[in-house]
């Protein structure tokens, strides 16, 4: 039988949740503030193209990605909305960016000078100047750098400064002192750029955390916000989780099915290293997902949900499978929920993040492309992306 995937392991992506998270945020920000949907890293693991289309249909005007390849992939799949690449690309690719009308992040005068000499035609290259106001990652850091950059940009009329932005390091934390320092520094840097005769039409700084927090308090987030984690229904931090201005709807859940169910005798060993021994006669299930799928070995000992019950992963997680202890026999093919609701129980990306001592962002990003993404819209299945079966890819 031809289907879109042949191993019973998949991630459901609820595009209705994404749509609501975008629409709810659009209602909250001022009408003149544009919403940029951040779909880098395959839409934080949710599927960049599908999330982009959903966000654009629900009020987003812009898209952001991290790397040039991601922007090109969106264009090649018919996305016409403006796209910003948030990290520097190779200067020799400026011509290609112009051809596909992809906006670029700049801050080094050397980059501008190299891009100027790159093979290009007459098409404009749209630039957003990054300001390092305290993230310490990329961006101009002082007025000398601003001046040198603007001077270099001015040497080629094909360069069009379209945007100016910064990124906050601590917007998700309760203590706002560092956020305010960065914000004030950004205002100073905007003045530098204005004083150099450049007035970028788009000015942006707010990530999900800043955007969820500040409009209600009258904080001015200029005329665009970059909406990432909250669009996927996750809180930017545990500190913020109980103070969200509207409920976020989680878009991703992860599922599999039991492929083996057996009763083992007391003392039976399970998995590599024979680290687990059945305490008594036990039911053991095998689930076809492993660390190569992003279900990390560090999750050995955590729970999955089967028949509405929490079942402990026993033994070491293998590359493609793991074993879990069942409270009783389950039929082969019974659904296993790794992230999401099952009966009255739920496993969340936040809970898993806590277990792995990381953040929810990393949980959805770590689910490998080998796990097919199944998309749901208006409560109906609309398609599957399974990169392993490229020829069967439906988008
Ligand atoms: N803008 C920039 C420049 C970013 O790097 C990110 C997220 C966002 C906006 C969206 O932030 P949000 O998801 O909190 O809304 N970047 C990253 C990162 O580099 N590591 O984790 C998140």
Image (cartoon, rainbow, N blue to C red):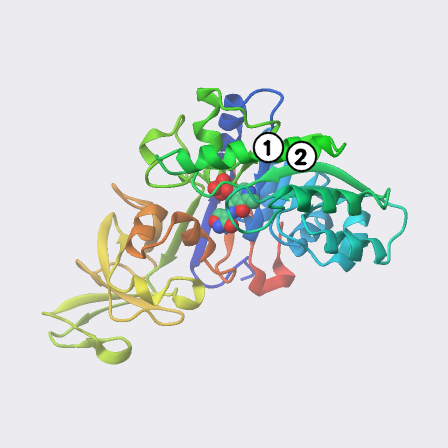
Q: Of the numbered discs in the image, which one, if any, rests on residue 349?
A: none
Q: Which residue is pictured at 45% across the width and 30% down the height?
A: 212
Q: CA distance from mark 1 to mark 2?
A: 6 Å
- The answer to whether marks 1 and 2 mark residues whose Cβ atoms lie closer than 8 Å is yes
> Residue 270 at what x, y percent from top left?
23, 74
Q: Is residue 191 above or below residue 330?
A: above
Residue furthest to the front: 144
> Residue 242 at what x, y percent from top left?
31, 32
Q: Of the numbered discs in the image, which one, if any, rests on residue 192?
A: 2
Q: Is residue 23 above or below residue 111?
A: above
Q: Which residue is pictured at 34% across the width and 54% down the height?
A: 338
Q: Secondary structure at mark 1?
A: helix
Q: Is residue 250 above or below residue 286?
A: above
Splitting the image into 4 quarters, where does residue 292 fall?
Answer: bottom left
Q: Secondary structure at mark 2?
A: helix
Write down the residue under mark 1: 188
Residue furthest to the bottom: 273
Q: Which residue is pictured at 86% across the width and 58% down the height?
A: 119
């Amino acid at each position: 039988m031809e289907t879109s995937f042949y191993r019973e392991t998949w991630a459901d992506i609820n595009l209705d949740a994404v749509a609501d998270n975008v629409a709810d945020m659009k209602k909250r920000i001022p009408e003149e503030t544009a919403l940029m949907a951040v779909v880098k890293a395959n839409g934080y693991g949710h599927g960049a193209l599908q999330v982009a289309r959903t966000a654009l249909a629900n009020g987003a005007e812009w898209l952001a990605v991290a790397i040039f390849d991601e922007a090109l992939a969106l264009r090649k799949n018919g996305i016409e909305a403006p796209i910003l690449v948030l990290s520097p690309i190779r200067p020799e690719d400026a011509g290609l960016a112009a051809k596909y009308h992809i906006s670029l992040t700049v801050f080094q005068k050397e980059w501008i000078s190299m891009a100027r000499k790159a093979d290009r035609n007459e098409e404009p290259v749209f630039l957003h100047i990054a300001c390092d106001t305290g993230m310490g990652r990329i961006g101009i850091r002082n007025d000398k750098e601003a001046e040198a950059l603007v001077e270099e940009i001015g040497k080629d009329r094909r360069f069009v400064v379209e945007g100016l932005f910064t990124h906050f390091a601590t917007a998700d934390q309760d203590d706002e002192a560092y956020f305010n320092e960065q914000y004030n520094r950004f205002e100073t840097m905007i003045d530098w750029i204005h004083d150099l005769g450049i007035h970028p039409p788009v000015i942006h700084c707010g990530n999900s955390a800043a955007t969820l927090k500040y409009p209600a308090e009258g904080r001015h987030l200029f005329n665009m916000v970059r909406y990432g984690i909250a669009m996927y229904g996750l809180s930017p931090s545990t500190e913020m989780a109980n103070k969200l201005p509207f409920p976020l709807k989680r878009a991703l859940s992860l599922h599999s099915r039991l492929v083996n169910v057996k009763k083992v005798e007391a003392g039976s060993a399970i998995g590599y290293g024979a680290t687990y021994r059945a305490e008594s006669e036990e039911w053991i299930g095998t689930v076809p997902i492993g660390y190569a799928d992003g279900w990390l070995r560090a999750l050995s000992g955590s729970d999955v949900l089967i028949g509405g019950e929490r079942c402990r992963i026993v033994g070491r997680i293998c590359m493609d499978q793991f074993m879990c202890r069942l409270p009783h026999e389950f039929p082969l093919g019974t659904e296993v929920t790794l992230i999401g609701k099952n009966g009255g129980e739920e496993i969340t990306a936040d809970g898993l993040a806590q277990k792995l001592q990381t953040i929810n962002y990393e949980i959805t990003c770590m689910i490998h492309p080998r796990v097919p993404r199944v998309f749901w819209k208006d409560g109906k299945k609309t398609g599957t992306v399974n990169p392993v079966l490229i020829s069967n890819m439906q988008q």
